[in-house]
Image (cartoon, rainbow, N blue to C red):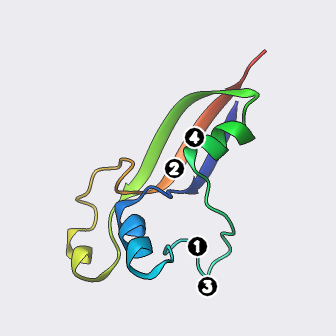
């Protein structure tokens, strides 16, 4: 089994901020994330493994006016801050 946790590059706020200013909040000068993993890149990276499950963690916004709704967003691809991928090695 292989469990991988990465920042969710598909978060709706990240997409909107990228359209607005050309940067994404999880990949900036202030943190140590250096690359964005799309789904296809993840599958290529772990091609010897079979994907068992994808979970999304912490469905919340921590920015501006949206902060008052923290914890009330679903933990899914659009709102989860992190992706947790569970793989099993193929034999």
Work out how far the residue at label 3 is from the one at label 4, CA to CA, in angstroms: 25 Å
The nearer-to-camera label among 3 and 1 is: 1
Q: Are marks 2 and 4 in contact (CB under 8 Å)?
A: yes
Q: Which residue is mark 4?
A: 85
Q: Earlier in the sequence, mark 3 or mark 2?
A: 3
Q: Image quadrant of residue 90?
A: top right
Q: Which residue is mark 1?
A: 27
Q: Are marks 3 and 2 in contact (CB under 8 Å)?
A: no
The nearer-to-camera label among 1 and 2 is: 1
> How many labels, in total?
4
Q: Are marks 3 and 4 in contact (CB under 8 Å)?
A: no
Residue 53 vs 59, above or below: the answer is above
The N terminus - image quarter: top right
Horizontally, residue 38 falls left or right of residue 61, namely: right
Q: Earlier in the sequence, mark 3 or mark 4?
A: 3
What residue is shown at x 57% (from left), y 50% (from top)?
Answer: 38
- Report the disc number at residue 30: 3
Q: Which residue is mark 2?
A: 83
Q: Image quadrant of residue 2?
A: top right
Horizontally, residue 22 falls left or right of residue 80, namely: right
What residue is shown at x 65% (from left), y 69% (from top)?
Answer: 33
């Amino acid at each position: 089994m292989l469990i991988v946790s990465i920042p969710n590059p598909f978060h709706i706020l990240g997409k909107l901020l990228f359209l607005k200013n050309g940067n994404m909040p999880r990949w900036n000068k202030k943190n140590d994330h250096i690359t964005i993993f799309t789904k296809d890149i993840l599958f290529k990276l772990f091609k010897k493994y079979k994907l068992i499950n994808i979970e999304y963690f912490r469905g919340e916004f921590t920015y501006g006016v949206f902060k008052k709704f923290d914890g009330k967003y679903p933990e899914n691809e659009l709102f989860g801050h992190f992706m947790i991928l569970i793989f099993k090695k193929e034999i």
